[in-house]
């Protein structure tokens, strides 16, 4: 025989099977089930056709109120709700990139691995936590170097959640503590170095920052994967001075390169003059090459003297 919905709901809540006579005639139930009757109403009265509509509206209103209260409580403590309520149970799905923190009656029970769970809804809360590595950027921090120069240094770091219990139950605000720890490590690293060293060895200071901040951040339940100096900014006047220094260095390098080029050219000319002095025929050869390279032109060459011409032989006048 098909049971009334209220009778099925009563049986689910109390675990008591009402006899058929009680279901049809409305006999009383024991006082130990009074609480269930107060919550769900009398299943015998609810099965009366005259009260079905009223009971259905009342049950729907109670379900909506219960769901709203559960959603409000979840959002108040843990952000968006972490499961779907199915009657007295809570259906929760933990994804691969998450871990679930299970609380019951306000106490932390355990960490839920990825999967689907059906939990008791009463006094049970699940907080999903994203465990994927994340980046954090700390904008320009005013730091004084060892030679008295004020700089603005920004850093970038990569971290991940290592211990959920420590990070969320034993630390009030892990992110704020992470920011503060990185800032203090940055001041220690930059404050003990000169500005020239900082500009020349930025990667080395990034490694020092990672070594300095790893242990304090591990105490927060987080794991520091990488840290490096992102930007170094100077004040306006100091920026102009450094620009002039760089410009002077570049101009000196350019003048040095010009001098080296001129020296090399003069050295080549001296070698050529020495070679012509030792071998005069090289000059004539070079002249002939110049003449041959410009055909159709007239070239006047000044000779050192008159070229002697041999006299013609005289003919004999005696006739035999």
Image: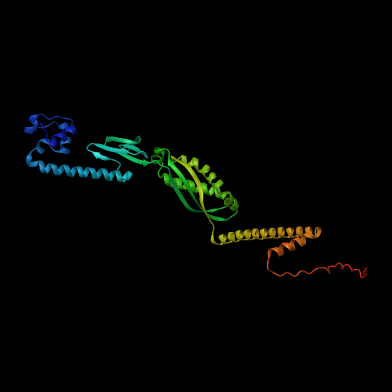
Q: In the figure, residue 63 lies in which quadrant?
A: top left
Classify residue 38 as left or right of residue 290: left
Q: Count the marks: how many? A: 0
- Residue 154 drawn at (x, y percent): 49, 52
In terms of depth relative to the viewer, which is nearer, 55 or 247?
247
- Viewer-proximal residue among 73 and 195: 195
Q: Position of residue 208 (x, y in %)?
A: 54, 44
Residue at the spot 32% in from the left edge and 37% down from the top edge: 103
Q: Is residue 286 above or below residue 39?
A: below
Looking at the rendered image, the quarter that the N terminus falls into is top left
Camera sees residue 236: yes
Q: Residue furthest front?
A: 320
- Quarter of the figure that contains the C terminus: bottom right
Residue name at image x 26 percent, y 43 percent: 70
**Within the image, what quadrant is residue 79 found in?**
top left
Residue 23 rendering spot, x and y as whole percentages = 9, 32
The residue at the point 25 percent across, 44 percent down is 69
x, y percentage for residue 179? 45, 48
Given residues 129 and 172, the one toward you in this image is: 129
Q: Is residue 270 left or right of residue 233?
A: right
Does the image show residue 123? no
Residue 278 shown left or right of residue 63 in the figure: right
Colour convention = rainbow
| Left or right placement of residue 172 versus residue 297 in this view | left
């Amino acid at each position: 025989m098909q049971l009334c919905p209220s009778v099925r709901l009563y049986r689910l809540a109390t675990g008591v099977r009402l006899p058929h006579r009680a279901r049809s005639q409305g006999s009383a139930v024991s006082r130990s089930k009074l609480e269930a009757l107060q919550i769900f109403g009398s299943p015998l009265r609810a099965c009366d056709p005259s009260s079905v509509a009223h009971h259905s509206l009342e049950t729907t209103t109670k379900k909506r109120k219960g769901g709203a209260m559960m959603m409000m409580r979840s959002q108040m403590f843990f952000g968006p709700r972490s499961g779907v309520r199915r009657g007295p149970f809570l259906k929760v799905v933990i994804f691969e990139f998450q871990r679930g923190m299970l609380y019951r009656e306000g106490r932390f029970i355990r960490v839920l691995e990825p999967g689907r769970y059906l939990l008791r809804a009463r006094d049970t809360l699940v907080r999903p936590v994203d465990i994927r590595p994340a980046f954090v950027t700390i904008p320009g921090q005013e730091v004084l170097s060892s030679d008295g120069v004020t700089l603005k240094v920004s850093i970038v770091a990569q971290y991940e959640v290592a211990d959920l219990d420590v990070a969320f139950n034993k630390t009030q605000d892990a992110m704020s503590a992470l920011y503060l720890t990185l800032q203090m490590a940055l001041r220690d690293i930059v404050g003990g170095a000169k500005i020239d060293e900082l500009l020349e060895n930025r990667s080395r200071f990034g490694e020092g920052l990672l070594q300095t901040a790893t242990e304090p951040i591990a105490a927060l339940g987080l794991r520091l994967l990488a840290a490096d100096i992102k930007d170094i900014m100077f004040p306006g006047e100091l920026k102009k001075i450094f620009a002039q220094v760089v410009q002077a260095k570049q101009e000196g390098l350019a003048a040095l390169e010009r001098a080296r080029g001129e020296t090399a050219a003069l050295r080549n000319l001296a070698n050529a003059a020495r070679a012509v002095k030792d071998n005069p025929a090289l000059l004539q050869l070079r002249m002939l090459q110049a003449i041959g390279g410009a055909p159709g032109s007239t070239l006047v060459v000044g000779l050192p003297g008159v070229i002697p011409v041999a006299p013609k032989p005289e003919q004999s006048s005696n006739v035999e």
